[in-house]
Structures are given as structure tokens and as C-alpha cells.
Image: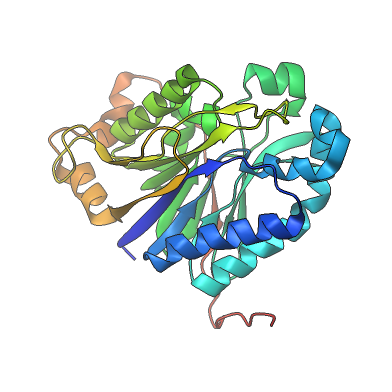
Amino acid sequence: MRRYKVAAAQYPIDRLPSLDAYEAKLADWVDRAASEGAKLLVFPEYGSIELTALSGEAAADLRLSIEALDRLIPEIDALHQTLARRHDVHILAASAPIQGGDGLFRNVARLFAPCGKVGRQEKIMMTRFERDTWGIVAGGPIAVFRTTLGLIGVNICYDVEFPLIARAQAEAGAEVILAPSCTETRKGYWRVRNGAAARAVENQCYVVHAPTVGAAAWSPAVTDNHGAAAIYAPPDRGFPDDGVVEIGTFDKAAWVMGDLDLDKVAAVRADGDVLNHRHWPEQGIVTAPLAEVVDLTPDAGMGRPMLAS
């Protein structure tokens, strides 16, 4: 599919009373986007932290709260998988601190395909809060996901401020980069926004930015959340002069939707007013790491998965 609609969430951090309430909220968000024709749904970084409210007094403790959240990950991932299948959409779930076999937590975004496959992208670059206060450690490798919607990369928040991560994905063929974020200040939002727009210029691709919004005074991790979801593109032939395809109203909980046309990406990479993607090596020795390509397309002979009733 070379043209499709994407939905980027300006997602509110709510204090939910139960797991059932979370499941109802997520199902409603997915249903609303899918009903408007979106085929790719992007939730923000750390949107899953709202589930730490279910841990009672532990919600105020950075470590105890994410340990409690980690125990819920299998169930919430199963819910995302079911919703992706039911609505025939790809869903980038809100990232979460997930504990590895080494006992350390990494910030992980999961991309759910409607065929049932799931891809994982761990955050590469840790902010000062993550590394100095929270104890979340850097992950990897850099991945590109092969989907029925094309090749997609994920830059989690701070990652989008570092050019070589997106460059590795672009060199592996990515035409769309998803940038889920969680920023507590307007300055933080603008750093991510400017990084996302710059990555779209450098790689002549779409970058889809999805932030958390709203106040969550009960959480020491995501107390304040500011941002506006957007779809950025290269300011070149066939795209808006300012490179902004769509952008939301600042701090308002909502879906921001727009069409992605991958043929336009191919066209400007081949014969744009400028050729940033092709001319990258002319800077000198600026080598991007290799990205790992993860196949999320249906296997040969794989039928539509049956849904549990």
C-alpha cells in the first residue's frame, strides 16, 4: 500500500480506576481512528505509565510503579494485538519500561501488525532523567519494520534528536519514521519537534510525531505533558512549503490524521528540488550504523487470524 492514512495521538495521561477502564479507553481510541480510515495508529512514548495508577501507593515510587507495570505488559500487548487484527490496522503501542532478562529496564515501543506479528524498538538514547534518576538503560538495535504499509522506523523521543539513528533506518529503506514522545516542558516539545522536522528534511521522508498531553500530578515520571502531534515531510515537490502536512492543537487530547503518499517520497528522493537523501555521503565520513530489518508482513499462506470471541 503506497498511500494510506496515519493517525498520531495527542494522548492524555489519565488516572484510571481499573485495567478494564484502560482497556475501554484504548479500544475507544483505536475504534475512532480506524472508523476514519486510519491504517497506522501511533501512540506516544510512556503513554502506558498511566497504568501505574493501578499500583496504589506504589504509583508514587519510580521503581515500584514500573515493576507493577511490567507485570501488566503481556495483557496489554495481547489487547493491542487483538485490536490490530480486529480493525486491520498497524498500531505502535505507547512505549513502556520493560524489564529484560538482566533485570534492567529499557524503554520499548512495540509495533503490532494485523497479521499478528509484533516488532520491538528499544530506545537508544537516554535522557538525563531516564539515566540519572529513573534507572532506565539504553537499548537496541536500531530496527526497520517491513510491513504491508512499507518500511517503517521508530525514533523514541530523544532518539529523533540524533541524526544517525534515523539515517540508519533511511539507508535500510524506511520512508516513514514514527516519533512517539513524552515531554514535560514546551522546550522539550520543541526539541523533539525540530528534530522530527530535520529528520524529514535530511532523509526526504515522513516523520510522524505523537506526544503525551495533560497533567498527571500523581505520577513522578510524567507529571506534566506538553505537545502537539504532527506529520512532517520534506519541503519539496508535492509537499507543503513548510513541510508540515498536519499538526494538532497544542495540549489538546485528540487524534491528528493525514495521508501519507510514499510515491511522493520516492519522487523527491529520485528527482527533488534538492537531493538530501542521495547527497548525505558527500558530507565526508558520516557513517550511520546498520539497521536490522524486521519482517512484520504475513507469511506465505498465512490467512486472517481467528479472533477469540
Point out residue 293 in the picture as x, y percentages from the top left corner: 53, 51
Give left or right: position of 236 versus 251: left
Which is more toward the observer, 53 or 116? 53
Q: Is residue 58 above or below residue 91?
A: above
Which is more toward the observer, 101 or 51? 51
Point out residue 58 in the picture as x, y percentages from the top left corner: 86, 34
Give left or right: position of 235 versus 32: left
State the residue at coordinates (30%, 62%): 2
Colour scheme of the picture: rainbow
State the residue at coordinates (59%, 26%): 224
Residue 103 in view in this figure: no
Residue 87 in view in this figure: yes
Quadrant into which the N terminus falls: bottom left
**Dividing the picture into quarters, in which one does residue 65 lie?**
top right
Give left or right: position of 76 versus 174: right
- Tag count in the figure? 0
Point out residue 287 in the picture as x, y percentages from the top left corner: 44, 27
Point out residue 59 in the picture as x, y percentages from the top left corner: 81, 35
Give left or right: position of 258 versus 118: left
Quadrant into which the C terminus falls: bottom right
State the residue at coordinates (20%, 32%): 242
